[in-house]
Amino acid sequence: MSFLLVLDLAGTFVFAISGATAGVARRLDLFGILVLSFVAGNLGGITRDVLIGSVPPAAISDWRYLAVSLLAGVITFCWYSAVDRLRSPVLVFDAAGLALFAVAGAQKALAVGLNPVMAALLGMLTGIGGGMTRDILLAEIPTVLRADLYAIAALAGAAVVVISGLLHLPPAAAMIAGALLCFGLRLMAIQRGWRLPVARQPERPAVEKHVPDDERR
Amino acid sequence: MSFLLVLDLAGTFVFAISGATAGVARRLDLFGILVLSFVAGNLGGITRDVLIGSVPPAAISDWRYLAVSLLAGVITFCWYSAVDRLRSPVLVFDAAGLALFAVAGAQKALAVGLNPVMAALLGMLTGIGGGMTRDILLAEIPTVLRADLYAIAALAGAAVVVISGLLHLPPAAAMIAGALLCFGLRLMAIQRGWRLPVARQPERPAVEKHVPDDERR
Amino acid sequence: MSFLLVLDLAGTFVFAISGATAGVARRLDLFGILVLSFVAGNLGGITRDVLIGSVPPAAISDWRYLAVSLLAGVITFCWYSAVDRLRSPVLVFDAAGLALFAVAGAQKALAVGLNPVMAALLGMLTGIGGGMTRDILLAEIPTVLRADLYAIAALAGAAVVVISGLLHLPPAAAMIAGALLCFGLRLMAIQRGWRLPVARQPERPAVEKHVPDDERR
């Protein structure tokens, strides 16, 4: 349990930095930056907890999640240039956070007796939910919907945990293996620019077409 | 119960196609398209289940919702041109999905003892929630907020179920009648371009005014 | 309890007007305007109730929240010009709604035994959640993330309630004091243009930079 908690807090911290960085870049004020820190760091876990009926969610009832998120936000606010220069280290931290959240989320979903496929998907959701909400708050299409192997890496890590659970392997070992797989996949995807395929489309300019949204400017 | 499930899965499938189509049109990758399929097909039901305290939601604990959503996403991904040419059939399917979800959602809300007005509104929410979330993920104002009689049709169908419940009429008949009413209303609204009124405004260009969003493109 | 309910309904009404006004300005139809009324008036409370596990949320199970929201929406729809001319009165009402929601939300969170820091934050969330969801539905960055002392005022009001609870002071007095503090802070922030600081940034144009979103058009 304590092991899970440390993983979770570490993941929260790195994700909160990603939220705060996005907030600074959009010129939000200090409060907005702290909100984005909390959202990016915790919304994945909160959504998972609400869906499995474990309320109040850990990120609400345990003050340490808040403390870690605010710390990340304040650090980014005060030393934005420094954090910003760390861009590729931040990507590495972010990959680590993704790995930690995916395996911890899958483990929690298994613990409440969810079926294996959904436990793996909730692990993935724990990993990507915070970043998705961050982007929604910034009125952007979530990066994860087009990024290179981001969610797939989280799903792979979560799947390792779930499959190990089915085989009754020791959970701690499974979580380490799953996290390493997710982390490795994500780093290689960044380095080599791996991407998922995009559907082929007819010739006309596709973007404008989608919705009967006749008042679009 | 089994009858409700079949309705629900059929509605999930047609809505998932609408989500996948929107994803392809925005050039999301395969993962993004599958997420939009799942979201459009299931977020209405998931939101309803979370609000009535029935967690984990059926769409999370029952793998068939996921399977049906992914199937719709993969079909759209592989044969986008074909699906896209089906544009008006898709509108018809979408009207069918709306009708199925609205009546099934109202029935479920009644079953947990919600008051009639709110049961009808939750039926409507079940029908429109998936599409709204799809549009939010795409950073657009939900179509349903301006579409021709979309939500009203769902509300009418849900109301039939709720009123029949108050009168102790047989639920299956009520659901069929409600679904037909919703389906018919929506089709006629599409054909004849029925719309709800828009408020009269002062002369100045109204759209730009609302929020201090100084970074709008 | 009845005191809490009156506060809550009054707050719902003024927030619903803010939602309806935003909807009219964006040329939504009548249904869209009513949805925005309900969302702006109730989503803060609904989110709080879901997070503390009190489902179905009061705004769903008690018809009066719906009635008050729809009333506000219809009034705004019919007399938009009049409501719009009331722009600065609306800001005053909005400040009142914020104050009412923040203290009522903190009180409810305390009542279910949440820890004090989180009870204060849930009070704040109750105050700002409706407006944030309204802006997300309109595909905009929530105003509260950049507005002058909006959330901080809510947090201050909620904190008064929570601290008074720790000191075993009478709740009704604490709620009045908290609401007055929040209301006063917000009005002074509007009048004097108080703002939270924004992080210093490097020289390059910051807005475009934010996310590794290399497909942005």
Image (spheres, coloured by chain):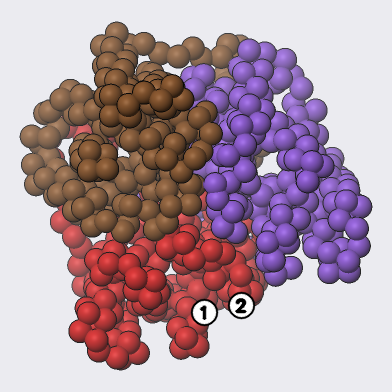
Chain colours: A brown, B purple, C red
> Image height check: is B192 above or below C87?
above
Q: Where does residue A152 sit, x and y in percent of width and height?
A: 42, 21
Q: Where does residue B166 sit, x and y in percent of width and height?
A: 83, 69
Quarter where residue C124 is shown: bottom left
What amino acid type is highlighted by mark number 1? Leu
Q: Which mark is residue C64?
A: 2
> Image height check: is C127 above or below A144?
below
Residue shown at 20% from the left, 84% from the top = C167
Q: Is residue C153 left or right of residue B123?
A: left
Q: Are marks 2 and 1 in contact (CB under 8 Å)?
A: yes
Residue shown at 38% from the left, 76% from the top = C111
Near-viewer residue (A50 or A197):
A50
Q: Chain of mark 1?
A: C
Q: Where does residue A212 sit, x and y in percent of width and height?
A: 66, 37
Tag 1 secondary structure: helix
Residue shown at 82% from the left, 58% from the top = B161
Q: Which mark is residue C9?
A: 1
